[in-house]
Image (tube, rainbow, N blue to C red):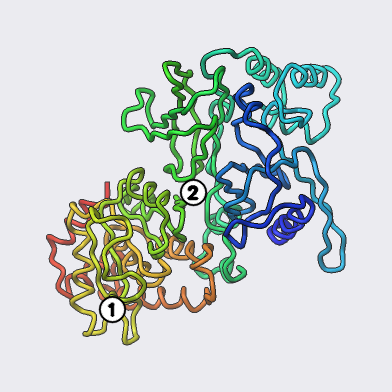
């Protein structure tokens, strides 16, 4: 019910703001253009920080590029919201009247005048002694985004106002956990039941897939042409992710779960101090512009106490509509070198090279899916393609790879059932990973969760018959040997993907 109310309120917000027409995406939130002038921004560099949107106790960010992430749904291609402050939204549902409160703000702008100055610090100082700020201003007063307003926030706000040089890190606070899953994904993964019906209750095409981005925010004493943000798993910043931006914030969406990361900002010859944050322990869903249903196939424990590696297989829907920004994220940031396309030649762009670029190792097989149909993995017509597809995972030169069909669910789910199975991932976890596709827009559209899960379970059951008394891992190995995959090739697949 909460998800429905959020989306209804988002629609009402468009009407309330009186915005301009959407620039493209039908789901875009229309907005008024910002009233802040370039001169004001030059004089107040912190105004390049993001606009936050707090709604129903959840925090979202709105950027000039604008990705508004509300309850798992992205709203793209809007302008920065100019309607700062607190708003009460009213709507009807099931003949009942409801209200929700929504606040747009920048950190430190307690009076919502689109400047951050001594007046804001005075308001916060008075609040700490007299508790006078309303709920809307309290959001803006939480300078380090740790959920509380205290003297630390006052100190940060005072430092922002006195900052004439250098870089000051604001949010998140030291040690904060971010990149949390969408609540629907979190619920699915808690005590997961392969026979459960949680994904069967989804509305067609509802986007509940992506993690909630983590926004890094800093203040700069002087406006810089660009800032370089380094994010790494160690304090010497070797192998760091590097982000270059003209703003004093950056959204992180694709980091590995359950890790501690360190970050710092370089502005010209100035360098900030170092802070750390943690990423939530959940599935590594990936946000790629122009592509849906993308996630890291890694991150799963094996039944013999090992680990299916992150960063080697990115399962995804078709790449046909990937944007240049999406291509850079997949190739330059995530390091994909191989595009394994499981579609029939002529299906979309299949057979015509990779949309990721001419330098990508493009492999295209007309792949089978599930068991028991003319297109199934037992069909003699697909035998050669099926064997070649499996052998792709035995060659270390093919990693990291993007593996996809059209939706990223059926043909992709079938090959990963066997690959993850022979590597020791439990059937329960393979089913969970498969079911995540149903929470994406493309994977859940016109889908029967019961039928789809049944197809994969039937395929697993028939593979299990290769070794009725053995584990699923042993059954996958016996099955692969029976169709012509060699023991050396199976060993190579495991060596590539398990640690």
Other-residue count near label 1 (Cα within 10 Å), few / some / many at <14 / 14–19 / ≥20:
many
Tell me the residue at 76%/45% (across/down).
102
Quarter holding the N terminus? bottom right
Q: Position of residue 270 (x, y in %)?
A: 45, 16
Tell me the residue at 18%/52% (across/down).
397
- Label of residue 377 in the image: 1
- Residue 168 makes an appearance in the image: no
Check the image and report above or below for 301 versus 86.
below
Q: Position of residue 450 (x, y in %)?
A: 52, 76
In the image: residue 74, left or right of residue 387:
right
Q: Secondary structure at mark 2?
A: loop
Check the image and report above or below for 297 versus 243.
below
Tell me the residue at 59%/31% (across/down).
48
Question: Quadrant of residue 460 in the image?
Answer: bottom left
As rendered, which of 190 and 355 lies closer to the eye? 355
Q: Earlier in the sequence, mark 1 or mark 2?
A: 2
User: Looking at the image, do the residues carrying marks 1 and 2 touch, with CB atoms under 8 Å apart?
Assistant: no
- Label of residue 282 in the image: 2
Q: Position of residue 315 (x, y in %)?
A: 37, 59
Q: Secondary structure at mark 1?
A: loop
Check the image and report above or below for 395 versus 261.
below
Question: Quadrant of residue 344 in the image?
Answer: bottom left
- Residue 301 makes an appearance in the image: yes
Q: Position of residue 432 (x, y in %)?
A: 46, 62
């Amino acid at each position: 019910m909460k998800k429905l109310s959020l989306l209804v309120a988002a629609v009402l917000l468009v009407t309330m703001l009186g915005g301009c027409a959407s620039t493209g995406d039908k789901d875009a939130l229309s907005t008024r253009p910002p009233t802040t002038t370039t001169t004001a921004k030059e004089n107040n560099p912190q105004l390049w920080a993001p606009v936050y949107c707090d709604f129903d106790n959840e925090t979202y960010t709105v950027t000039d590029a604008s990705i508004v992430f509300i309850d798992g749904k992205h709203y793209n291609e809007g302008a920065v919201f100019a309607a700062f402050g607190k708003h009460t939204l009213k709507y009807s549902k099931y003949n009942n009247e409801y209200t929700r409160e929504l606040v747009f703000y920048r950190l430190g702008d307690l009076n919502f005048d689109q400047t951050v100055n001594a007046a804001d610090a005075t308001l916060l100082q008075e609040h700490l002694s007299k508790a006078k700020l309303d709920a809307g201003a309290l959001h803006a007063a939480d300078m380090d985004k740790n959920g509380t307003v205290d003297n630390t926030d006052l100190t940060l706000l005072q430092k922002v106002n006195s900052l004439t040089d250098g870089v000051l890190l604001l949010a998140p606070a030291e040690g904060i956990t971010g990149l949390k899953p969408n609540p629907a994904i979190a619920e699915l993964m808690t005590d997961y039941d392969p026979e459960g019906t949680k994904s069967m209750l989804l509305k067609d095409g509802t986007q509940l897939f992506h993690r909630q981005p983590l926004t890094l925010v800093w203040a700069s004493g002087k406006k810089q042409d660009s800032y370089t943000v380094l994010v790494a798993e160690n304090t010497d910043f070797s192998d760091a992710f590097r982000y270059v931006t003209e703003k004093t914030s950056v959204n992180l969406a694709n980091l590995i779960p359950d890790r501690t990361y360190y970050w710092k900002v370089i502005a010209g010859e100035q360098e900030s101090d170092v802070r750390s944050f943690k990423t939530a322990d959940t599935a590594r869903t990936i946000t790629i512009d122009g592509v849906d249903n993308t996630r890291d196939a890694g991150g799963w424990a094996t039944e013999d106490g090992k680990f299916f590696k992150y960063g080697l297989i990115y399962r995804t829907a078709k790449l046909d509509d990937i944007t240049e920004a999406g291509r850079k994220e997949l190739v330059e940031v995530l390091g994909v070198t191989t595009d394994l396309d499981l579609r029939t030649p002529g299906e979309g762009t299949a057979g015509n090279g990779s949309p990721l670029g001419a330098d990508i190792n493009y492999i295209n097989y007309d792949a089978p899916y599930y068991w028991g149909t003319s297109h199934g993995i037992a069909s003699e017509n697909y035998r050669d393609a099926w064997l070649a597809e499996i052998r792709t995972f035995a060659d270390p030169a093919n990693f990291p790879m993007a593996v996809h069909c059209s939706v990223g669910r059926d043909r992709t789910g079938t090959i990963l059932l066997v690959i993850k199975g022979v590597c020791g991932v439990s059937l329960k976890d393979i089913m969970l990973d498969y079911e995540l596709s149903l929470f994406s827009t493309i994977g859940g559209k016109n889908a029967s969760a019961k039928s789809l899960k049944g197809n994969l379970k039937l395929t697993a059951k028939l593979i299990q018959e290769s070794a009725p008394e053995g584990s699923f891992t042993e059954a996958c190995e016996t099955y692969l040997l029976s169709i012509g995959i060699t023991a050396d090739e199976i060993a190579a697949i495991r060596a590539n993907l398990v640690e």
